[in-house]
Amino acid sequence: MKIAKQLRDTNIAEYLLYMWQLEDTIRAYGCDADRLRDEYVSRFELSNEESREEVQWMADLCTMMCEEGCREKGHLQMNKGTLSLLTDLHLQLLQSPKHPFYSAAYYKALPFIVELRARSGRTDVPELENCFEALYGTMLLRLQKKNISKDTQEAVNHISHFIALLADAWKKEKAGDLEM
């Protein structure tokens, strides 16, 4: 919970990737709050109060995942909502003449996004979701110490740059410092 709050305030892209990772962690523990408490949260050096808060948060996430039908796959509504808000900001930035570097980064990444969408067959989801899926998938490959092809790395580099600019714009917008 503490990490999620920090990331939400500092880097919305990292926050969303963290939350997707947490969804997968919860799935790995069978959406079982007791197992998460005993086998996951207990490994962290937390005060009693921090531990109680983390366990309660995990239990709440388990409940939400079960109620929202994403126990096996998919994402929590709050994460979908964050992605939707990012998509809205993305579209605003593309329409604004005050953000040419953002538009340039997007159009530089666009061929890679189109290719990823075609390969995944997931053209029914927002482009940004495809971008986050690429970043998340690459992160998982790295954690597994698997090889990442040169072409994939190039695509991820362009997408990462574009998403970093979006995350920066999000932070500026939340601070009231983004001009449209």
Image: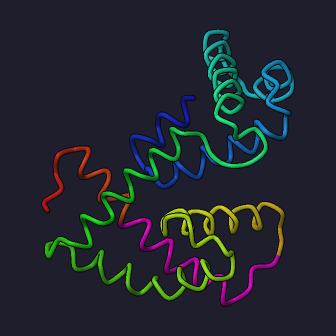
Residue 70 x %, y %: 70, 41
Residue 127 x %, y %: 49, 69
Say if the magenta span includes residue 179: no
Examine the image and state in which quarter residue 122 appears. bottom right
Position of 59 relative to 69 (above/below): above
Give the residue drawn at x 54%, y 39%: 77
- Name the residue at the front extreme: 124
Examine the image and state in which quarter residue 41 appears. top right
- The chosen color scheme is rainbow
The image quadrant where one finds the C terminus is bottom left
Residue 90 x %, y %: 33, 64
Position of 71 relative to 84 (above/below): above
Give the residue drawn at x 78%, y 21%: 33
Question: Is 53 left or right of 167, judged from the image as shown?
Answer: right
Position of 121 relative to 167 (above/below): below
Instruction: Tell which of 157 and 16 is nearer to you.
Output: 16
Question: Is 153 left or right of 127, judged from the image as shown?
Answer: right
Give the residue drawn at x 68%, y 81%: 119
Position of 3 relative to 169 (above/below): above
Marker count (numbered): 0
Question: Is 66 left or right of 154, judged from the image as shown?
Answer: right
Question: Is 78 left or right of 42, judged from the image as shown?
Answer: left
Prevalent SS, magenta region: helix
The image quadrant where one finds the N terminus is top right
Residue 148 x %, y %: 75, 79
Stretch in magenta: 147-165
Give the residue drawn at x 30%, y 66%: 91
